[in-house]
Amino acid sequence: MELSFSYKQTVPSEWVDYNGHMNDAEYNRAFSLATDAFIDHIGLDEQGREHYQYTIFTLETHTCYLKEMHEGKEFEVTARVLDYDVKRIHLFLTMSNADGEVVATLEEMLMGIDQNEGRPAPFPNETAEKIAAEYQAVADQERPKQLGRTIGIRRK
């Protein structure tokens, strides 16, 4: 099944570092922009945040850099809801180049926040329904191989 969300952009020159490819921080900027676009997609755009007095915070991320991206090259980020509950989303983002090759992934945990209380709170009903629909659309797919990775040096 095709995912209903995607974020597209081209690598700007200011994102390229002294190695001649996109800097690691800029991959994370691109993923952050894509996460914001996903949050808009599920109904918490500026108008939704104002209406519900509700927002989403990022609790944790893990990035895998798989291929280089260069200035002027197009990329697309897709999002997959791996799991969710009443106030959290376990989201997996995949960045692909114009040839469809996966160049980076980002796994993250998001938390819904009541802006009046400044505390975690259940998603607004309409948002919760959209999250559930995003999850159901991909629930039967194979889990990404970069999922749940830990950082460490393997010893033989």
Image (spheres, rainbow, N blue to C red):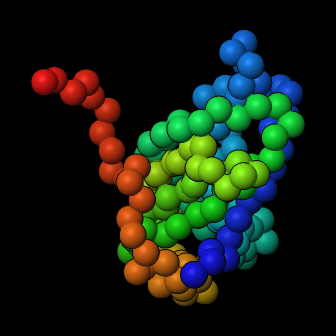
Q: Quadrant of the C terminus?
A: top left
- Left or right: residue 22 versus residue 61 is right
Q: Residue furthest front?
A: 99
Q: Which residue is drawn at 70% across and 65% down?
A: 6
Nearer to us in this view, 19 or 121 = 19
| Residue 142 x, y percent position in the rendering | 39, 70
Q: Which residue lies furthest to the top in this view?
A: 18
| Residue 129 x, y percent position in the rendering | 55, 87
* Residue 87, quarter of picture: bottom left
Q: Quadrant of the N terminus?
A: bottom right
Nearer to us in this view, 8 or 118 = 8
Q: Which residue is drawn at 42% across and 59% down?
A: 144
Q: Tell me: residue 34, above or below residue 69.
A: below
- Left or right: residue 19 versus residue 103 is right
| Residue 59 x, y percent position in the rendering | 45, 49
State how many labels appear.
0
Q: Which residue is drawn at 83% across and 26% down?
A: 14
Asked if residue 2 shows in the view, the reply is yes
Q: Tell me: residue 112, above or below residue 108.
A: below
Nearer to us in this view, 148 or 32 = 148
Q: Tell me: residue 116, above or below residue 43.
A: above
* Residue 29, quarter of picture: top right
Asked if residue 52 shows in the view, the reply is no
* Residue 154, quarter of picture: top left
Q: Tell me: residue 48, above or below residue 39.
A: below
| Residue 111 x, y percent position in the rendering | 47, 60
